Image: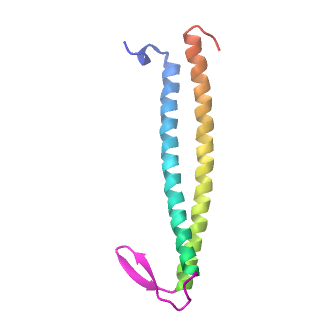
Amino acid sequence: MSEEGSLPPKVQQRLLLFQQLQQQLQSVLLRRQQVQLELMEVENALKELEGVGDEAPIYKAVGALLVRAEKQKVVKELEDRREFLKIRLEQLDREEKRIREQLEDVRAKLRRDLGAQAGVGP
């Protein structure tokens, strides 16, 4: 018989919750990494545009096309995107912290449950 099958239902539920929280954490970490990468790209683009004259031709990607755009408009769009990404990063940081706290709580309860089941005590 499997070890999981011999566990009480309460402990099995906690194990399932623990696994779900681990998956949620992985998902948040992946999204956070993607946002950080995009933020770096936006900041690099803004840095490059600083050295370009206001009248220089600027092109931006729109789908598979490159279209000409005004520098000021592109800079404004990039600054807005940068602010959005910073806010999103803060949200993901808070979500990561919340999930980590939940994981630690469930981990402690599992240790207590499994220790009690083994007859070791808390």
Residue that sits furthest to the top in the current view: 119
Q: Which residues are magenta?
A: 51-70
Position of 90 with respect to 59 (left or right) is right
**What quarter of the picture does the N terminus occupy?**
top left
Residue at figure coordinates x 58%, y 14% from the top left: 115
Q: Is residue 55 magenta?
A: yes
Residue at figure coordinates x 38%, y 15% from the top left: 2
Q: Position of residue 14 (x, y in %)?
A: 53, 26
Residue at figure coordinates x 60%, y 23% from the top left: 109
**Looking at the image, is 13 positioned above or below residue 85?**
above
Residue at figure coordinates x 54%, y 64% from the top left: 40
Q: Position of residue 91 (x, y in %)?
A: 61, 53
Residue that sits furthest to the front in the current view: 51
Name the colouring of the figure.
rainbow
**Looking at the image, is 52 positioned above or below residue 9?**
below
**What quarter of the picture does the C terminus occupy?**
top right
Total tally of numbered discs in the picture:
0
Q: Position of residue 42 (x, y in %)?
A: 53, 69
Residue that sits furthest to the bottom in the current view: 55
Quadrant for residue 73, please give it: bottom right
**Looking at the image, is 2 positioned above or below residue 94?**
above
Q: Is residue 105 magenta?
A: no
Residue that sits furthest to the left in the current view: 64
Position of 76 with respect to 34 (left or right) is right
